[in-house]
Image (tube, rainbow, N blue to C red):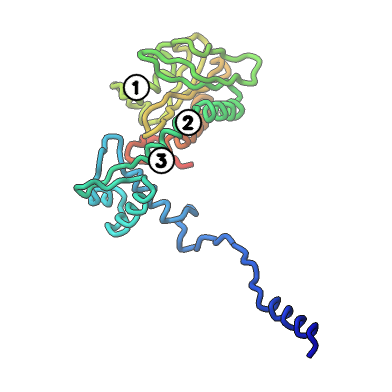
Amino acid sequence: MKQSTRESLVAKSIRAVKPKRSVEVAEAPREADLDATGGVIAVSRALHLLDAFGMQDERLSLAELTRRSGMHKTTALRLLRTLALAGYVVQRDDGEWRLGPAAGWLGARYQASFDANNVVEPMLLALSQATGESAAFYVREGNSRTCLARVEGPQPIRHHARMGAMLPLELGSPGRVILAFSGEPGKLYEDIRKKGYHFSIGEREKNVATVSAPVFGLRWALLGSVCISGPSDRLPKAKLIGHAKTIMKAANELSYALAGRPTAQTPSVVSTWHP
C-alpha cells in the first residue's frame, strides 16, 4: 500500500473516533420536585426554616424548628446542614441553631437597596386610576400623621393634601386606621380592626371624604395607611363603602410586597386575602 493511502486511512480513523463536543442542557425540575405553587419543594422548605426564626429568637433547638416548620426532624436537619454550608445558619456547641452571617448580609443588602417609594407610588397611581380620586400614603409621626407619598386624581375638582404636613391622628380615616392597628382601645377601633378599613366624611376638613386601609411592613408591623380622598358630594357614604374593597386590595398587595408570606403576626383582615 502506498504511503499516501496509509496516511489517508489513518486520518479518517482519527476523525471517526474524535469525541463530539458536549452540549449542556438545563435540566427542567421534575414535577415531583415542585410544590403546588410551582416552586421547588426543597428551596421552599429551606426558606420556611429561615422564616421560623422570630425577631426575639437568638437561637432555636432542632425540636422547636421542626415544630414551627411542621417538618420531620430528619428533613429539617438535612436542610439546616445545607444552609450552614452557605453560612445562613450556624449550629452552636450546645446543638441549637442561630441565623448565620450570610442571612445578616442578605438583610443588610436588602435594606440598603430598598426604597418604599418604589412600591408605594406605583400602587397609589393604580389606585387613583381605579377610583378616579387622589390617593395618598400616611405614616405615624409621634401623635400625628404625615403624608409620605401622594398621587393626584384625574378630576378637575379634587382634594389637595400637602406632603409632609403634620395632621392629627384622631381626625380623618387615615389617622383612625393607624390608631386602630396600633392597638387603640374602644369600640370604634375594634370595628375598624374587624372590617379592615374606615371612612370619614367632613371629620377633619369640611366637605372632604376619605376611605383608608392599613399597610404592613417587615414582620407584619404596621407601616401606615393608604387612602383615597375627594369632595364629599362626589364620595357619599355608599360610594366610599363601594371603594373600600379596592382600597383594601391595594393595601394588602402592598403589605404582601413589603412583608412577604403570611405568618402568625399577619393581621386577620389581611390573612384572609391572598395575592
Q: What residue type is labelled 3?
A: Thr
Which badge, 3 or 2, is on the more N-terminal residue?
2
Q: Residue at x 49, y 31 (%)?
A: 113
Which badge, 2 or 1, is on the more N-terminal residue?
1
Circle 2 sits on which residue? 251
Q: Give the number of callouts.
A: 3
Circle 1 sits on which residue? 188
Q: Which residue lies furthest to the left in this view?
A: 94
Q: Residue furthest bottom?
A: 1
Image: 273 above or below 233: below
Image: 246 above or below 90: above
Q: Which residue is drawn at 45% across and 60% down?
A: 33
| Mark 1 residue crowding within 10 angstroms, few (<14) / some (14–19) / many (20+) | few
Q: Which residue is drawn at 26% across and 38% down?
A: 57
**Residue 219 location (% of width, % of height):** 36, 34
Of tags 3 and 1, the one toward the viewer is: 3
Q: Is residue 242 visible?
A: no
| Mark 2 residue crowding within 10 angstroms, few (<14) / some (14–19) / many (20+) | many
Of tags 2 and 1, the one toward the viewer is: 2
Mark 2, secondary structure of its residue: helix
**Residue 81 location (% of width, % of height):** 32, 53
**Residue 13 location (% of width, % of height):** 70, 81
Circle 3 sits on which residue? 272
